[in-house]
Image (spheres, rainbow, N blue to C red):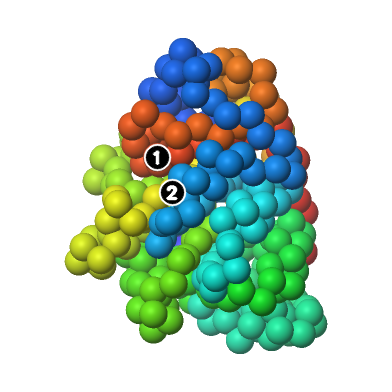
Amino acid sequence: MHVTAIRFVTCILLFSGGFSLGATSADYIKNHAVKAEADQVPASLVNTFKTKKLILVGEIHGTNEMPASALQFINAINFGQRILVGVEFPADIQAEVSHFMKTGDVTPLKKTAFFTDSFYHSGRGSQAMMAFLDSLRRNENVEVFCFDVPDNYKGTTRDTDMASNILQKLTAEGNPQTVIFTGNIHSRLTNGVSWNPHLKTMGAEILRLSNGFYDFNNSDNLLFRMNEGSSWTCMTDDTGKIKCETYFWKPANRDYATAVNFDYYFLREPATEDGHRNTFFIRKVSASLPF
């Protein structure tokens, strides 16, 4: 497959996950949704994740609210112990990321191909993501690592390759508590999506490749869902040309949005829905421009 085609498919996967129809009923959501605030993580969310060794957090790239909520989540579950945070940046810019995390100097990072080519980062190299990293670097318990495949897309084995990269890092570091912040298809703990039941996802591949070390008892995941707003990313237009810009999303108004009127809430799913066991709902998101 041509590189461009692979990149486009990835963007579509990310948005399909965010707007999934979902099977969780409105009644269940109404009875179990735990209201949250933009700057506050519910105790029930903390209690769900505090003992987990591996946590995957799935987002739609290119928003302000999802990196900000991921930061609140990481801060809330970190009780002074060492924690690894994986970001969906290519592993070959690890030195530049580590330099920034240590010094706050963005100059080398801004010169990398990943940050200078909007088509390459497709919203992952956003201002909000840099604010996320800048906040994390002030926490001495946090170490950030990059796990994506260098040169970005390497065909249909990308999720398997990323899973392998993550496991190598975790093994080398003694398997501390780890949060992986990634796109909302990669974060699934089960394989398959509605349009491709055989699709391998990074989360499921981590479980498989770990040979039982990571499982559904010590691992978990969280999906950021939204109802409307905007995001900065790369998608195709009606002519087939891929354009990187701010896209606007009309209200989906599905059960996650209509069952309760909360702007933010946490929900422990009754089953593994869309490959995720937990939801953090954000009613409206806004685009974060490239850094």
Q: Which numbered circle lies on residue 95?
A: none
Front position in the image: 206 or 249: 206
Image quadrant containing the N terminus: bottom left
Q: Residue at x 62, y 54 (%)?
A: 76
User: Distance from label 2 to label 1 (Cα)?
Assistant: 6 Å
Q: Residue at x 53, y 42 (%)?
A: 45
**x, y percentage for residue 135?**
74, 65
Identify the amino acid type marked 1.
Arg
Q: Residue at x 54, y 47 (%)?
A: 46
Identify the amino acid type marked 2.
Asn
Q: In the drawing, does residue 33 fall left or right of residue 137?
A: left
**x, y percentage for residue 144?**
58, 73
Callout 1 secondary element: strand
- How many marks on residues? 2
Local crowd size for mark 2, using a 10 Å CA cut-off: few (<14), some (14–19), many (≥20)? many
Front position in the image: 92 or 172: 172
> Which residue has dot 1 on it?
277
Image quadrant containing the C terminus: bottom right
**x, y percentage for residue 128?**
74, 56
Q: Is residue 13 visible?
A: no
> Which residue has dot 2 on it?
221
